[in-house]
Amino acid sequence: MIENEKWNKIFNTPLEEPPVNEPERQYYFMEKAKILIQELVQKAGRPLTFCVTTFGCQMNARDSEKLCGILKNIGYIEQEDEEKADFVIYNTCTVRENANQRVYGRLGQLGKAKKKNPYMIIGLCGCMMQEPEVVEKIKKSYRFVDLIFGTHNIYKFAELIVSRLESQRMIIDIWKDTDKIVEDLPVERKYPFKSGVNIMFGCNNFCSYCIVPYVRGRERSRDPRAIIREIEKLAQDGVVEIMLLGQNVNSYGKTLDEPMSFAQLLQEVEKVDGIERIRFMTSHPKDLSDELIEVMARSEKICRHLHLPVQSGSSRILKKMNRRYTKEQYLALVEKIRKAVPDISLTTDIIVGFPGETEEDFLETMDVVKRVRYDSAFTFIYSKRTGTPAAVMEDQVPPDVIKDRFDRLLKEVQHISSEVCAIHQGTTQTVLVESVNDHEPGMVTGRLSNNLLVHFPGDEKLIGTLVNVYLDECKGFYYIGTRV
Ligand code: 5AD
Ligand code: SF4
């Protein structure tokens, strides 16, 4: 425990009770953690380091930046090698079973590293921790883990660290759901020039294969004023590109006290000076409005890219998936978008081997791929997630059949994608420069509005700026260009 004297040095009055309100409460615990970590640093006679490892989607990547913000704030220094770090945290994903397997595999390795480092603290958080069986397994087979928390109380990270440092016990804190959104905690951004911005949390769609609604809870939209305030601050900080994040951004604002549509929010975001590019993820086809298409078509700032997960091309399977659109409706939507925004790049997610999928159903999916001609498609083998309606459906497809379909689909997707990507060859496009190219000295790498990468001669001074680049040659999934 920290003696009162130390507290008196920080606060004028002795603080017996932490504040009740957030985020003040977490700032109180960060101060407390700073003192505890300083004591450990002195004992160790060296700085202490941290490593945050992220699995899963953009939402998790953004959450990890929040974890980094707090660890830095309390005195840890970032380090890339997790086995050498003193505080390691895995921000986990559970969307498919193989994501879980990867976590267990790496955790085993980490346990060995911990035996050699008495200062090592291991934390686990994120979607996988929302599953009771997972937590049971860790309690039983991975006793060396220090801290487990879930997706709803990530804002309590500082408080949980203090609990761990004060008790030396395994700390477990998982909430089933929350309606709380805590604003204004520290964030350590990975890139100085671009950033994700959460606009909503959770999901109400209940696609029958998907575990997300169970692990991320009910849909909650952030107050638009808080979103704009955050984006204004980011712009002042030099951020030029933002990615608005939510499981289903098209239903943004429906549950707010003063309801607002996603298209309206986008128009507010566009007004922020300094923001040059706006992206968003993920769109559900059933909720994509005409208003949004119009706003995209008019906009100078919204990127020419739409990720529109189709999941399957068979209306019969889509019904079993509870996607609430048919193949025809999806194709009509694509046509409408292409008409309004002809240069749009479309990407998608596809699941192969959903229970009951027949060869005919699969051919419907192939048909959609051939008709839409996606710029790229993420293809997934169906993974049975306990607790979802699909897990108990009959006719689970045999693995060898799935493998065969998956290979055929991947081949088609890649073939089309290489053709589609090449269409910008010989044009000049605006590029946001992201990094120097590690492999080729004198080259930098940037991103087009449609999300493709381009490598061209330049130096690190260009990072974070928007420049015009002539696309000389398409090399499959990226371009080689020249600055103009
Ligand atoms: N099995 C396979 N893929 C899945 N996805 C979500 N749940 C599952 C599952 N049980 C895929 C969907 C989603 C993407 C993020 O992950 O295609 O769009
Ligand atoms: Fe994985 Fe879904 Fe959680 Fe993202 S929200 S980390 S995809 S389970």
Image (spheres, rainbow, N blue to C red):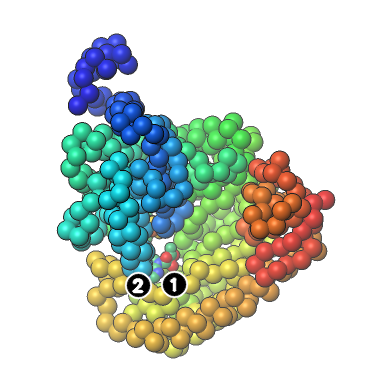
Residue type highlighted by circle 1: Phe
Residue at 67%, 70% (x, y): give it: 476
Q: Is mark 1 within 8 Å of ligand 1?
A: yes
Q: Are marks 2 and 1 in contact (CB under 8 Å)?
A: yes
Which residue sits furthest top? Answer: 12
Residue type highlighted by circle 2: Ser
Q: Which residue does the numbered mark 2 point to in the structure image?
A: 383
**Could you tell me which secondary element the residue under label 2 belongs to?**
loop
Residue at 60%, 41% (x, y): give it: 193
Mark 1 residue crowding within 10 angstroms, few (<14) / some (14–19) / many (20+): some
Above or below, 31 relative to 318: above
Whole-percent x, y for residue 4 in the image: 21, 17
Whole-percent x, y for residue 9 in the image: 31, 13
Residue at 25%, 68% (x, y): give it: 386
Residue at 35%, 43% (x, y): give it: 87
Ligand 1 falls in which quarter? bottom left
Please indicate, yes or no, whether residue 337 appears anywhere in the rendered image: yes
Residue in the foreground of this view, choosing between 339 and 406: 406
**Taking 100 as reference, is 273 left or right?**
right
Residue in the foreground of this view, choosing between 440 and 353: 440
Say the numbered circle drawn on residue 420.
none
Q: Which residue does the numbered mark 1 point to in the structure image?
A: 380
Q: Is mark 2 within 8 Å of ligand 1?
A: yes
Q: Quadrant of residue 343?
A: bottom right
